[in-house]
Image (tube, grey):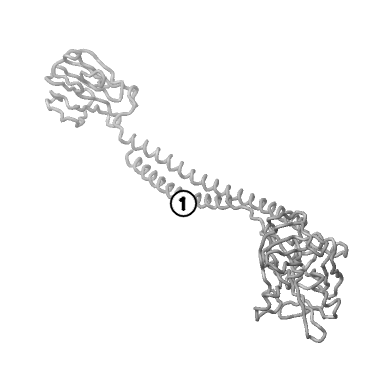
Amino acid sequence: MKWVRRIFMFLLILAIAGCGVLAFLNFKDWSDAKEDYDEVKAEKFEADDAVTGFTTEENQKSVAFILCIAPDNSAYAWGSSYAVGSDVDGKVQYLVTNGHVVQPHKDMGFSINVVFEDEEMVTPEVVFYEFDEALDMAILKLPEPVSMRKPVVIRDSDTVSAGEKCVAIGYPDKAAEVDSNFSGDISSQSVNSGVISNTNVVPSGVSYTTFQHDSFISHGNSGGPLFDKDGFLIGMNTLGRDDTDSVNYAIISNTVTDILEEYDIDYVDSEDYLDDIEGEMSAAKKKFDKKHDAELADAEEAVTEARNKMLIFVIAAAVCAIALLILFIVGNKKVVMVGEQDDGKKSYLICTKGIFAGQTFEIADNTMTIGRDKNSCTFVFPEETPGISSNHCSVYFDVRTKTFVLTDNGSTYGTYLSNGRKLTKGVPEKLAPGSTFALADKANEFMVDRK
């Protein structure tokens, strides 16, 4: 029934539209999930900057101003120092400087002070002092650990090569002479970079080994640190040539650490520091990888789920579209499968007049086409038959209307009904079983029937 088919087709159209909308919405979900997945996948573990060492600004927090003052305040001397300790993030109690910076205190009765911010001065104890040709070094101990300075990280001086970049930090007296705001705090420090030119120099008049470098220093830099490009201590500035600013000397770090170890004073070794950092980074990376893998798995699952939902609606829409197409084709199909019809009868074309008179032909295909062209016709007249066109007409049985349908295919001499009416080209004409029609000059006449 037509109305049932139409309702079903309407419902299929609604289903296709609904599935299309849902597929589009799920496509957006899938696209968003894929974008999230790509973002998670692109995430990389980033190592802490501490792995590469320290910045100059960080190392300035290790340097302190040493001020020696005469008992009658008539004279003073100063130098630089740097903090040592066992924890780079902890408090410090020990400072290292040159012996000659402390000499006024040891030999002339000057008071000795470590100057911090806001001109806060702390009097240290000198726990080690040597100022001779063998060594120029002193170690100061503060009354209690302080957080105003951080310890340096010391590198093995045997690993230093000529040509390496270096940085000297301290309180040069030449800077103090021109700086009216000089107060001895971090802001008063000078930072000068240079290059190590020689790693095994014993200056005239002494017996200890130094690095020769061209970072600018002057008297106030004495006792101050010399850092490598990564911010690790490699030496202690101690001497400079009077005739040039570009030839200066720093006691190598291994000499300093030998004394620290002799006095059981803890310090941070660069190799140990890097090993600890590497261990922390390794643990952090494992933690990151575990979290990242879980997030990636969740994102991948979300992509798969969204994709599967989208495919379900796409497939459903496709199935509905196919069903709709089948209904449309079947609804507009003029002939069903021939042969055994639903009434158990077959369709026949019976020639009542003409060259095939007395012969009966089964309409065995959907449509029987009559004419002279054997390539396009299923019922073929001899080529020389007068009045018959190459593709003259066609006939089939419509099981729905229980009638035969005859159509003239544009023949030259026409197709005629039994009442003499000529068919219009391409316009189907229904014939009841037992009806007759003729071709051209009516020399060939046929009857259609069901048996």
Which residue is found at the position 84% from the left and 65% from the top? 133
Q: Is residue 348 left or right of residue 265?
A: left
Q: Nearer the viewer, residue 420 or 226?
A: 226
Q: Where residue 129 sits: x, y (%)? A: 86, 70
Q: Where residue 286 sits: x, y (%)? A: 70, 51
Q: Quadrant of the N terminus?
A: top left
Residue farthest to the front, as pictured = 243
Q: Which residue is mark 1?
A: 25
Q: Quadrant of the C terminus?
A: top left
- Specify the quadrant of the image occupied by residue 127: bottom right
Q: Where residue 256 sits: x, y (%)? A: 81, 63
Q: Nearer the viewer, residue 197 or 57?
A: 197
- Specify the quadrant of the image occupied by residue 11: top left
Q: Where residue 196 sits: x, y (%)? A: 70, 59
Q: Nearer the viewer, residue 393 or 125?
A: 125
- Specify the quadrant of the image occupied by residue 422: top left
Amino acid carrying label 1: it is: Leu
Q: Image height check: is 275 above or below 402?
A: below
